Image (cartoon, coloured by chain):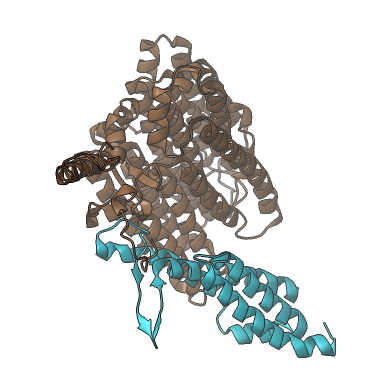
Amino acid sequence: MAGNADHAVDYAAGMLMAPTSLADWLIVAPSLITIIGGASLVMLRYQAKWHGYLACFYLAALVLVDALLLSRVMVEGPITMTMGRWLPPFGITLVVDALGGLMALIAAIVALAVCVYSLADISVTSTRFGFYPALLWMMTGITGSFLTGDIFNLYVWFEVMLISSFGLLIVDGERIQLDGAMKYAVLNLMATTLFLVTTGYLYGAVGSLNMADIALRLREMPEGAAPMGTIATLYLLAFSMKAAAFPVNFWLPASYHTPKIVVSAIFAGLLTKVGVYALIRTLVLVMPEGRDMLSDLIAWIAALTMIVGAIGALAQNDVRRTFGFLVVGGIGSSMVGVAVGTQDAITGAILYAVNSILVMTALYLAFGILMRKNGGKVNLADLGGGYRASSWLSILFLALVFAASGLPPFSGFWPKMVLVESSLKEGYGWLAFSVLISGFITTIAMGRVWAHAFWRGGPIGTQDGRDAAPLYTLSEIVRRRVFVPVMALVAMIVYIGVYPSPVFSVSQYGAATLLKPDQYFDAVFGPVRAQEKERAEAQAVEGHRLNEASENGAVQNSEGAH
Amino acid sequence: MQTLIFRTTAPFLAALMILFSIFVTLRGHNDPGGGFIGGLIAASAFMMYGIAAGVEYVRRALYFHPISVAAFGLVLSSGSGLLSMFEAQPFMTSQWTFPTIMGVEVAISTPMFFDIGVYLVVMGSLTSIALKLEEE
């Protein structure tokens, strides 16, 4: 594009000529807000007291932009923007469909809740260390992963997310945090490296990195032309590691209880779900053939993950580790949907991911309030007296217990019902049974936590709390900052539980786009096809005119046939 | 490092290296070079000056905290993609202008500002790490 060239350049051969409307800039706005927001906080490193408020402002803007994006997608179908005006599949294409838009919106809401909570929970030292920029940049990676339509770009966003999450994990630099961070870092670096290697393999086999292009090429290839089984299995392994599914789940409970509670909350809510999202995106949209081959394997992984998560939650004494195992169990439920693979099942998987994001974050935050009140005690034996200290907190927590176990009328109920129904319909009776049994064990595990922490009067060794030390009361401003986010999240959980149809219809639309992706392909390649057609017509007219000019046919027109 | 020769030559050498890093960055659009390698050269200039004279001299010479410089580079890089908004073109579409300054045609473009942003990010973050290590 060197402008001082003397010859005319045919831009239309490789670049999009149609103007981009300002509304399409919504697609890149989430990444820009978080990148520039994080950078502006680093530039204001000596004004640490403003960091929290500014970060909450940027995240509120992110929620707004994601909501606008999702509402546009629901009206117009998937929308795209290809970076630098290059025509897809050559430019990096960002694609927002209902699945990506919904996940991005829920992630932004959760991040905003965590940010408001952090105003009370993050010390000035941690702020100087760079807590809020790391939070914003992690959101860059997460929203980028949800909105990209390019598989290598997905890898890049994974890296952005990973690097910032390292920063969040060690924000206080304590010994135990470094220990947890090592386990987290090693496993996640292996997973992303495997992801990169597999992407290289896929590129070698198919010759494209654009997801829509790969999907189209794979559908046109004769069966057996590309090693789909190998590639799909490698992706399954890589994303299972990120999502903490059964044989590779051990790193999550070993590292999620070490950082600050706000960090645990956002990690538990978002990071594993990005793995599940990537799994759904690659296996269902890009290579359905690979998913069909692996469906029984995924079903086994899903069942074992659910059972291991539930039993692990029952076995723990540290409540934060209990929650870690709950995260693992939730991943299993989402994978049930991928294993069954019908439209209802995928809808259930998306719904469950949404539910799990909200519930896990809210659980960690609610428990964080209790930890502030009892001076940081986390073992079941030391807990007690929560109800007397704050009846509000114990009611909120009980709602979360029910939602995590999948009991009505909370958001956990509907996805489990859809998943059980669709697995029964497809002849996966044992899978439906393991959804139910894991829900049952989770109910016991969570009931145990609630009974120990809130219901009984005091810790072990006290006479029902009569001689126990009273719990702290929080100052007014702290109470507002920690309760408002938890209440907002619980309100959403109750709302989805009582009135599920809006979220349900978005998830259903997302699942439909994944299974019949014509709309998705049209969104990516529609402008290209229109432009190529226009160009061919223009050249045909040009060729015709040239032919007329040289009546004797001396001019060989090789261009016109394009 | 307390050697007279190194201490005396380091400022000149550092100035030369920074000049060279700017040259490498600007020629990077069409020739080997670019923001990343330029940033590395600039960072090594500051590291060397820090070893020769002491970290506080480098911090004073830089005026801004290196990590803030890196953050500014990030803003510059992502901001350079925004200009195409006014041309109704997608994000990161390059925009060019060719003003004639003192009889010479100068190519100014958004990729150049992107590269300068990369230069600042690499220079700032590496200098920040190196100065911290030299202080220990």
The residue lying at 49 percent from left, 71 percent from top is B116
Is residue B56 toward the left or the right of residue A533 in the image?
right
**Residue A380 visible in the shown view:** no
How many numbered marks are there? 0
Determine if residue A382 is in view.
Answer: yes
Instruction: Residue A423: give x, y in percent of width and height.
Output: 40, 15
Q: Nearer the viewer, residue A43 or A53?
A: A43
Image quadrant where residue A411 sits: top left
Q: Residue A333 placed where, x, y %?
A: 46, 26
Front-most of residues A41 and A169: A41
The picture's colour for chain A is brown
What is the display colour for chain B? cyan
Image quadrant containing the C terminus of chain B = bottom right
Q: Position of residue A267 (x, y in %)?
A: 51, 46
- In the rendered image, the vertical position of residue A263 relative to residue A544, given as above or below: below
Q: Residue at x 70, y 88 (%)?
A: B12
Residue positioned 66% across, 69% down in the render: B129
Quadrant for the N terminus of chain B in the image: bottom right
Is residue A361 left or right of B94 when viewed as pictured? right
A287 or B134, which lies in front? A287
Q: Is residue A128 above or below residue A434?
A: below
**Residue under the point 18% across and 42% down:** A547
Image location of residue A197, percent across then percent down: 60, 37
- Determine the image quadrant of residue A399: top left
Q: Nearer the viewer, residue A191 or A523?
A: A523
